[in-house]
Every structure is written in structure tokens, then in C-alpha cells.
């Protein structure tokens, strides 16, 4: 019987940090934070008070597809 595509899996999502995104894009962390502030890169806020920023790999791929130079 096929799995229900609407059912969420118990697997944790792998999220990227601002530093990891900066290393992947070969830019500074400040540049990544500017993209977040401008609304170009979607983030997930985690941790106490939502202070920690994490980026879904799909959101990073969408950002890179739009911001090619």
C-alpha cells in the first residue's frame, strides 16, 4: 500500500545555518543576513525566543535560482 503523501514523516528536516549558506554561496554571513532582511531568502526561526536562524535547503535553492548573476 503506498504511503500517504500528506502524512508528515518522523524524519527531522536538515536545516542550514547562516554560516553554511554563506560558505555554499562563497559570500559573507552579512550578505546572507541582508538577503534575509530584504525578504529574498526565507528562514525558520528556532530556539528560545526565535533568535536562531535556519534556512531550508529548498528555500536556499529557490534563492539561488532567482539571484543568479
Image (cartoon, helix red, strand yellow):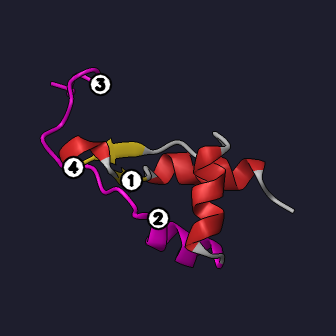
On screen, residue 64 above or below 27: above
On screen, residue 51 above or below 33: above
Task: From the image, tell me which residue sits under label 1.
Answer: 53
Identified at 55% across, 53% down, the residue is: 60
Are the residues tagged 1 and 3 within 8 Å (C-beta)?
Answer: no
Give the CA distance from mark 2 to mark 4: 15 Å
Circle 4 or circle 3, nearest the eye: 4
Disc 1 secondary structure class: strand
**Residue 31 in magenta stretch:** no
**Which secondary structure type mostly characterizes the magenta part of the structure?**
loop
Which label belongs to residue 2? none
- Left or right of residue 62, residue 54 in this image: left
Which label belongs to residue 47? 4
Specify start and end residues of the magenta stretch as a single range: 1-26
Identified at 52% across, 67% down, the residue is: 21
Q: Quadrant where the C terminus lies? A: bottom right
Which label belongs to residue 5? 3
Identified at 72% across, 51% down, the residue is: 65
Give the CA distance from mark 1 to mark 3: 28 Å
Percent position of residue 28, x then y: 62, 75
- Left or right of residue 27, residue 46 in this image: left
| Badge 2: residue crowd in 10 Å (few <14, some 14–19, many ≥20) | many
Q: Quadrant of residue 67?
A: bottom right
Disc 4 secondary structure class: loop
Give the CA distance from mark 1 to mark 2: 7 Å
- Left or right of residue 31, residue 43 in this image: left
Task: From the image, tell me which residue sits under label 2.
Answer: 18
Amino acid at each position: 500500500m503506498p504511503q500517504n503523501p500528506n502524512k508528515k514523516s518522523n524524519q527531522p528536516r536538515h536545516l542550514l545555518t547562516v554560516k553554511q549558506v554563506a560558505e555554499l554561496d562563497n559570500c559573507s554571513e552579512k550578505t546572507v543576513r541582508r538577503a534575509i532582511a530584504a525578504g529574498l531568502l526565507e528562514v525558520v526561526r528556532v530556539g528560545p525566543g526565535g533568535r536562531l536562524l535556519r534556512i531550508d535547503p529548498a528555500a536556499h535553492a529557490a534563492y539561488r535560482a532567482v539571484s543568479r548573476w
